[in-house]
Amino acid sequence: MSYASAQALVADDLATVEQLMLKKIGSNYAPLAEVLTTLVHSGGKRVRPTLSLLAARFYPPAKHRRLISLAAAVESLHTATLVHDDVIDGALLRRGQSTLNAQWTPASTITAGDYFFARAAALAAETEHPRVIQLFADTLGVIVDGELRQAFTARDWSQPKEAYFDRIYGKTAALFEVATRTAAVLGAAPDEAEEALRAYGYHLGMAFQIVDDILDFVADENTLGKPAGSDLRSGIITLPVFFYIQQPERRDELVALVDGQRQGEDVVAEVVGLIRASEAIAEARVEAVRFVDHAIADLSLFPFSPHRSALEDIARYVVERDF
């Protein structure tokens, strides 16, 4: 089963989720409403709401509309983080399209992201489930923590691998985790099942971000939709970089290039080429596969079914994708 066929199992619900997100934009200020509508329509692969909708098939909630609100809240929270990320990273392109950050001032873009955070919170409240709302609030705190860790550890070339894992948990895995866990909570799943779906989301999210960081070096820029080596430009140490600089002479060479007096695209291209040609890419991929294997194992608690197979196939897709 491909990702598309796995997602097809919940296609009708995904369409309803997008309709709800558009309905809840709720701004009477035309420029903001127009931008938010564009952001919803450019929503990418919808991985996170797909996970919520599939996870909920094990223990369907009594009121299906609450599940739609949950999935819409998950995707709205993701969209808000992307808007803020683009400001933090100074990104002008995402998915091959001009970012809001390229069109508005940073202050205005941050404010638009804040509005989307507010919409996500309102959608989470529509689940009418106090624990779901609390988990969303907790996750937002984890996401902010991850962003701050990333900002304050930039160019710390001696940081341990665990620091990277802590960062990507906040940056990505926490949202995957809450997407699957809250689906279980909403359906009143037993504690063991809730924990299994939480762990699946966590392991899948960790693998997803590791693969994103690999693609930052190996993917074609036109396919990736942004310049290669984007994180490295900001001194962010991702897993391929970590593995590459474990040899002291490589670390010295990379630091001299990234922090030296030479600047510009040629320097970035040189560093990207060095890492791309090294064994660091394969070593990072091994870590991603390890997380995916854990994610698939987390689902062993549940009986075989089309939605369990779909979640397993999405996990495999995460490490096989090229964008």
Image (spheres, rainbow, N blue to C red):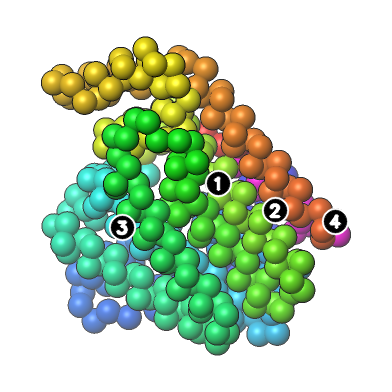
Q: Is disc 1 placed on a helix, strand or loop?
A: helix
> For the residues marked 4 and 3, what is the alpha-carbon distance in whole angstroms?
38 Å
Q: In this view of the protein, can residue 63 be seen by the observer?
A: yes
Dot 4 surroundings within 10 Å: few (below 14), some, or many (20 or more)? few
Q: Amino acid at mark 4?
A: Phe
Dot 1 surroundings within 10 Å: few (below 14), some, or many (20 or more)? many
Q: Is disc 3 placed on a helix, strand or loop?
A: helix
Q: Residue 83, labelled with which disc?
A: 3
Q: Earlier in the sequence, mark 2 or mark 4?
A: 4
Whether the residues at callouts 4 and 1 have beta carbons within 8 Å, the answer is: no
> For the residues marked 2 and 1, what is the alpha-carbon distance in whole angstroms?
15 Å
> For the residues marked 3 and 2, what is the alpha-carbon distance in whole angstroms?
27 Å
**Image quarter (top left, top right, bottom left or bottom right) of the N terminus:** top right
Q: Residue 304, labelled with which disc?
A: 4
Left or right of 284, for residue 41: left
Dot 2 surroundings within 10 Å: few (below 14), some, or many (20 or more)? many
Tell me the residue that label 1 is attached to: 206
310 part of magenta stretch: yes
Whether the residues at callouts 3 and 1 have beta carbons within 8 Å, the answer is: no
Q: Earlier in the sequence, mark 3 or mark 2?
A: 3
> Mainly helix, strand or loop, the magenta region?
helix
In the image, the segment drawn in magenta is 303-318
> For the residues marked 2 and 4, what is the alpha-carbon distance in whole angstroms?
11 Å
> For the residues marked 4 and 1, what is the alpha-carbon distance in whole angstroms?
24 Å
Q: Residue at x 65, y 48 (%)?
A: 314
